[in-house]
Amino acid sequence: MSRFAILLGGALRRTPALEARIAGARFIAADSGMRHAETLGVTPELWAGDFDSVSDRLSAAHADVPREIHPPDKDRTDGEIAVEAALRLGATSLVLVGAFGGRRVDHFYQHLAQALRLAEAGVPTVLTSGDQEGLPLTVGERQEFDYPDGTLFSILAFGALSGLTVEGAKWPLDAVEVPFGSSLTISNEVRGRLAVTLREGRALLVAHPGAEEG
């Protein structure tokens, strides 16, 4: 198994939850995501993107990191380019670091959708900012999550959901149908051992394990 952490341009806070996710990982920076290398105290093995959001200071500080430079006029985001580079280098699982927040809501959406696509292709993927993390739900499997009592979580749907069961929660669900756009699965809390089963649909569990840390 080879885990890669992709440093993206969104928000980041160094927390125990984040450090547990990236322990033993290899690092690739995507464009301005290189700034997180300083926060984490790591040196990526590759820096990829069009470098249009990279300051002169950041560029000079990491001049020794190999670069994969792409033109600004391209049909992929810097994050997707960095993920493709990780897969070429043998990544079998991914952590998208700095995947939440940032100035571009379209990039934030792309990170969520990309994580779902990667998981469906057999590449386990986690998104994290340190304070919150996202994990794609696998259709037809009962997935357990090791979060402490009181952890806030939501299930973000990318379409209608069928047969959604949520156990170990303040508001459990039993094989319910969730119309697209419903807020039924927003703002729940862990009570015991959280487990989620989804029969049909696409969704991510977004939890806030680091919100009270630090």
Image (cartoon, rainbow, N blue to C red):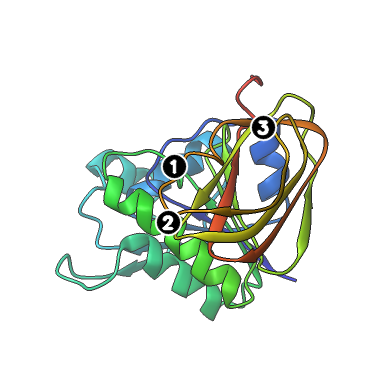
Task: Give the Cα distance between marks 1 and 3.
Answer: 14 Å
Q: Are marks 2 and 1 in contact (CB under 8 Å)?
A: yes
Q: Residue 212: percent from the left, percent from the top?
A: 64, 19
Q: Residue 182: percent from the left, percent from the top?
A: 45, 44
Residue depicted at 58% across the width and 78% down the height = 121
Q: Are marks 1 and 3 in contact (CB under 8 Å)?
A: no
Q: Earlier in the sequence, mark 2 or mark 3?
A: 2
Q: Is residue 76 left or right of residue 166?
A: left
- Please, what is the three-letter code of the amino acid marked with disc 3? Pro
Q: Is residue 51 left or right of residue 83?
A: left
Q: Which residue is mark 1?
A: 100
Within 10 angstroms of label 1, few (less than 14), some, or many (20 or more) residues?
Answer: many
| Residue 157 seen from this side | yes
Q: Earlier in the sequence, mark 1 or mark 3?
A: 1
Quarter holding the C terminus is top right
Q: Is residue 200 above or below residue 25?
A: below
Quarter holding the N terminus is bottom right
Quarter of the rendering containing residue 72:
bottom left
Q: Earlier in the sequence, mark 2 or mark 1?
A: 1
Q: Which residue is mark 3?
A: 209
- Please, what is the three-letter code of the amino acid marked with disc 2? His
Q: Which residue is mark 2?
A: 111
Q: Residue 16: percent from the left, percent from the top?
A: 70, 32
Task: Give the Cα distance between marks 2 and 1.
Answer: 8 Å
Q: Is residue 111 above or below residue 97?
A: below
